[in-house]
Amino acid sequence: MTRAHEVARAQDPVKKAALLLGPGFITGAADDDPSGIGTYAVAGASLGLSTLWTALLTFPFMAAVQNICSRLGLVSGTGLAGILKEHYPRWVLYPAVALVVVANVVNVGADLGAIADAAGIFVGTQVPWLVIPIALALVALQVFARYRFIERVFKYLTIALLAYVIDALLVRPPLAETLRATIVPTISTDHGYIATLVAILGTTISPYLFFWQTSQEVEEERAAGRKTREQRRGASPFELRIATVDVTLGMFFSNLVMYFIILATALTLHASGNADIATGADAAQALRPLAGDLAGLIFAIGMIGTGLLAVPVLAGASAYAVSETFGWREGLDEDWRRARPFYGIVALATLVGVVIPFTGVKPIDALFFTSVLNGIAAPFLLVIIMLAARNKKVMGRQTIGRVLTTLGWTVTIAMFAALIGLAVTSFGS
């Protein structure tokens, strides 16, 4: 039975609401990983409220892109790499997959290090070795647990993101000033400002989410008993509607968290002149004397929870992309003995990431690097996604309509414009 059927049959409003939240909601929460948290914290600490308006901009962008990816998976019956392999040249497929895997592995390492740093706030000392048992536990979860159990665990981990809403309320934001910064965009040609905008766009509209979203829609259908590609092709209007609600809620939640992280750090760290932070964990430590120990600890809790969610999503997205590229059996509902290459990529991506925190690379360098790298890669991938979503060979009669087409191309153009702005200011500096 598909999730759409379960939603239709559910009588209890609470159960119906819980069933509505699926791959789209998990994707939205995973987008606020320690990489995103670090980027938003740096934006708030260094630029104050001037980037607060970007949350209003990125919400429709994210919702449009992830809805398009969701429809690609639901209608085509395969993941994004599978679509690229079937319908586009290898010179498009291989660089796209290679880029997302490299960025994901670096992101995994940075996120694991961020989890350990945040945990160190609680024990009062650094515990870098903690990345090893955490990584092993997350790999074991994906290899040995069934998909439905993994999905439930991911849903519970999303609760940790409410920590940032609480944090922002603790610092008591001034209403008039906050509303003005939210509604009226701040425009600047400063290189640092534009680089931050590109990083924000790169960490909110990330290539790994494109691959993850499409593959998770396929995973949902497999879990409902649609094992073959032919059984998965096409989607009913009700299934598409349920997916749209799920994805839109997920992206709204993601942007809400982004908004409150920028707000909390702008009103505390930037206001006190403390803009020199290296990670989200540094932001958590810096918040403690400014907003109280509770605010700092809540910030750290959010980092741990979202990191535990993001690491398997990053590793899983890499495994889906590589497996679809080479035609390997893939899926979190597959027995590990039948899908060894898939789970091997999950383990390899995670365990290589474990090494990164011990190399001496500064976490903020790794986090910001992946954000900007994603910002560079995303517009080129978006061109392919938009072409695929309008391609009848891929989507049959269920190609995307005018609204998603308009929003999708607007996002693509905006991402290219941000890149050009970054290049111009970089050359000028």
Image (spheres, helix red, strand yellow):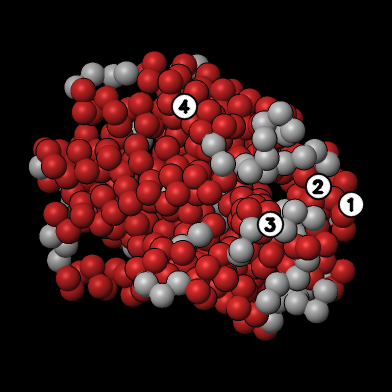
Query: In this figure, which residue is indicated by the disc labeled 4?
Result: 137
Q: Are marks 2 and 1 in contact (CB under 8 Å)?
A: yes
Alpha carbon separation for disc pair 2 and 4: 32 Å
Q: Residue at x 59, y 23 (%)?
A: 352
Alpha carbon separation for disc pair 2 and 3: 29 Å
Helix, strand or loop for disc 2: helix
Q: Position of residue 322 (x, y in %)?
A: 74, 39
Query: In this figure, which residue is indicated by the disc labeled 1?
Result: 89
Q: Position of residue 51 (x, y in %)?
A: 37, 60
Query: In this figure, which residue is indicated by the disc labeled 2?
Result: 93
Q: Position of residue 171 (x, y in %)?
A: 14, 54
- Mark 2 vs mark 4, foreground winner is 4
Q: Residue at x 12, y 38 (%)?
A: 293
Q: Callout 2: few (<14), some (14-19), or many (20+) C-alpha neighbours within 10 Å?
A: many
Helix, strand or loop for disc 1: loop
Dot placed on the residue nearer the N-terminal end, 4 or 3: 4
Alpha carbon separation for disc pair 1 and 4: 38 Å
Dot placed on the residue nearer the N-terminal end, 1 or 4: 1
Q: Callout 3: few (<14), some (14-19), or many (20+) C-alpha neighbours within 10 Å?
A: few
Which amino acid type is marked by label 4? Ala
Of the pair 213 and 94, the residue shown nearer to us? 213
Q: Residue at x 54, y 29 (%)?
A: 139
The tag on residue 225 is 3
Q: Position of residue 253 (x, y in %)?
A: 39, 62
Which amino acid type is marked by label 1? Pro
Which amino acid type is marked by label 3? Gly
Alpha carbon separation for disc pair 4 and 3: 28 Å
Depicted 232 relative to depicted 392: above or below: above
